[in-house]
């Protein structure tokens, strides 16, 4: 059984999604692939066509930047403009598939 997310949890998920959108695209993609998608650094580096060390650096910088964004609450997008938390998780996980498909298509 599952329980619905509390209002506080919903707000945190919306903030997480907004925070991810504040990151540069290469860092956002790296963090989504490794953090949300559960891919290894090697798999993510292959998808993004970059060196392993570059992927590790992108993820590290993205995590630090996201932490700063979340702690400061400095978002360019207003919370009211962000999708509901129930959609935020789906959007983040959907990004894994989108990034992977886009990168694979570009590599062909």
Image (cartoon, helix red, strand yellow):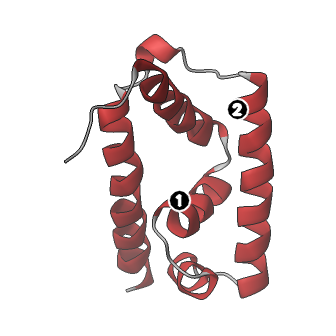
Residue 7 drawn at (x, y percent): 41, 19
Q: Residue at x 74, y 33 (%)?
A: 69
Name the residue at 42% across, 27% down: 10
Q: Residue furthest front?
A: 1
Residue 39 appears left or right of 24 = left
Q: Which residue is mark 1?
A: 32
Residue 71 is left or right of residue 20, and the answer is right
Q: Is residue 26 above or below residue 41?
A: above
Q: Residues within 10 Å of mark 2 (few under 14, many from 20)?
A: some
Q: Is residue 64 left or right of residue 5?
A: right
Q: Quadrant of residue 76?
A: top right
75 above or below 66?
A: above
Q: Which residue is at a point 61% across and 35% down the rendered structure image?
A: 19
Under circle 2, the secondary element is helix
Q: State the residue at coordinates (28%, 32%).
A: 4
| Helix, strand or loop status at disc 1 | helix
**Residue 104 placed where, x, y %?**
39, 79
Of circles 2 and 1, the one toward us is 2
Q: Nearer the viewer, residue 40 or 6?
A: 6
Which percent across, then down, holds residue 23? 67, 44
Mark 1 or mark 2, which is nearer the start of the sequence? 1
Q: Nearer the viewer, residue 4 or 23?
A: 4
Say the numbered circle drawn on residue 70. 2
Check residue 74 in the rendering and tell me which mark sits there, or answer none.
none
Residue 28 locus on image (x, y percent): 60, 53
């Amino acid at each position: 059984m599952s329980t619905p997310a509390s209002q506080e949890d919903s707000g945190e998920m919306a903030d997480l999604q907004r925070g991810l959108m504040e990151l540069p695209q290469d860092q956002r993609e790296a963090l989504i692939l490794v953090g949300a998608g559960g891919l290894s650094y090697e798999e993510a580096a292959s998808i993004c066509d970059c060196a392993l060390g570059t992927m590790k650096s992108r993820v590290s910088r993205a995590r630090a930047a996201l932490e700063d964004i979340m702690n400061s609450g400095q978002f360019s997008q207003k919370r009211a403009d962000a999708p509901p938390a129930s959609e935020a998780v789906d959007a983040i996980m959907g990004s894994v598939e989108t990034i992977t498909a886009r990168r694979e298509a570009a590599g062909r």
